[in-house]
Amino acid sequence: MGTNELLEEAINAPDDFDSNEYSELFEHMFTDLRTLSKGDKEIFSNLYYNRDADFAEFKTATKNLFETGHNIVIIGDAGIGKSDYIHRLIYDALLLEDARLFPIMIDYRKQNNMNSMKLRFIECMGEYFNTHAQKITLSQDVEHNLHIIQEALFAVSSTTKKKHPVIFIDDLDYAEQEDLFPILKLFIPYAKSQNISIVLSVRPTLHKTLQRNDGTYSHYFTRSVKIIKLSNLCVRNILAMRLAPILAFSTAENKGLLKNVLHVLTSLMSGEKKYEALLKRLGINNLEELKKFQFPFTDEYSTFMREISSNNIREAFDIAYISLLFILDNYEELENEKDPEISENRKKITQEQIIELFSKEGGRYTIFDLHKLKSSTGNSLYYNVLEAIAFCHKRNLDVKFYERLEKMGHSKESVDNELKILARKSNRFLSANDFTYAQDDAKEPIEYKLTVKGRFYLFEMSQWAAYKNKFDRESPTRNIKDLIESVIAE
């Protein structure tokens, strides 16, 4: 039975289908791995974050930390799975035991200020010393405790310690300007010590900023370290496998028992392998069978989800969740499109429906209006700035860059302001060579580049008839490319 038939069966089964229950089920299936039970970590890692080659490199890098005390930096874009990649090692009890490692997890989004991070670190180090090295006595004084820990670490030797402490620092990219470098300064003494290691996960922009700042940070966090660069995951495959239990439930012997599925999913917080049991209950006996279930979206829509989120897995899950509810609510009205590979019809969400679905007021994800701000000559500021970045072919923003935008009616002041807006974390249309929300001591000119999302908007979405009709119908924007190529007379 194909995907469409399964969804249709759910819709046509009044005793079983309830939009609220589907909503709850979808939310469970797109839950971040760290909130699931430890018992299901292995199968979830294999299904959704399968980085066997990368993880083998990570395991090799951690294997000798007990003896070497080296540091590791993991580099990857937002939502690419850095956190789950780290947690996969932390939950690998056998690996930690064999390598004699004591993991200490410091997550900026959980310990979101300096004092909270210090307290978390002191608590973990107190446990380490009292169980795996010489015992220490801590007080109520935070700074005094940090001094005691540093002194105790200096005295540690391979003959006195049973395990090697490893500090995993995650989500540091969320640190605001006043926190970032003080946090790094806090951990510099431990980055220098061979008796403790640091595993730092960062986005490329933060890594580049560390390289550009003073020699202390660049040496201990970017140069004298093992660097692991994570590549993009296939959003389409991850979503397809996450959705398989939803699409498969009506093929099981007790088909249509959605409430039973929900009951099992809501109990996944326990340590048992209940997700694996759920798959078997649905008639799925191994991972290969699970991979055969077909993805409910067309390739065009898969591309939209990937590009609009800049390959951010978390955001793609949210968009898929919203989209699936839309399919269920509008099933009969949606067009069919045949997938040539499987000769099966799939429901098609058209460009007009995409614009409508993601243009709603108050929605969590909304289409960005590149034509919101126009000059007196009717040219769109956001659109022209992105085009100028794409077509000026200059390493840095030079005089001609501003001159060309001025010919479109945009002042230098307004251009500089919009550059910052387009490069914000919340927008991610541009990437810059500085960490724009942290203090960067380097004085080099800022270099801007289009991101995946920026290119998608500029070269694809802004050309959609539905997008133009919604945002640029009054006075179509002239483009910088034509100006540069002298098609428009200067």
Image: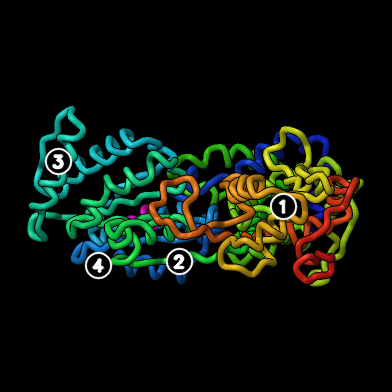
Q: In the visual, does 106 lie left or right of 437?
A: left
Secondary element at image label 2: strand
Whether residues under marks 4 and 2 lie with C-beta atoms below 8 angstroms apart, the answer is no
Query: Residue 427: within the magenta?
Result: no
Sequence-first disc among 3 and 4: 4
Q: Which residues lie in the magenta part?
A: 89-93
Residue 280: which quarter of the image? bottom right
Q: Amino acid at mark 4?
A: Asn
Q: CA distance from mark 4 to mark 1?
A: 44 Å
Q: CA distance from mark 4 to mark 2?
A: 20 Å
- Residue at which label 1 appears: 247
Q: Amino acid at mark 2?
A: Lys
Secondary element at image label 3: helix
What residue do we see at 83% from left, 54% from top? 477
Decide which of 186, 341 is in the foreground and name it. 186
Label 2 CA crowd tier, 10 Å (few <14, some 14–19, many 20+)? some
> In the image, is residue 65 above or below residue 364?
below
Q: Which mark is drawn over residue 64?
A: 4
Secondary element at image label 4: loop
Residue 54: which quarter of the image? bottom left
Q: CA distance from mark 3 to mark 1?
A: 56 Å
- Residue at which label 3 appears: 147
Residue 244: which quarter of the image? bottom right
Residue 158 seen from this side? yes
Q: CA distance from mark 1 to mark 2?
A: 34 Å
Q: Which mark is drawn over residue 259?
A: none
Decide which of 237, 349 is in the foreground and name it. 349
Q: Amino acid at mark 3?
A: His
Q: In the visual, does 400 lie left or right of 81?
A: right
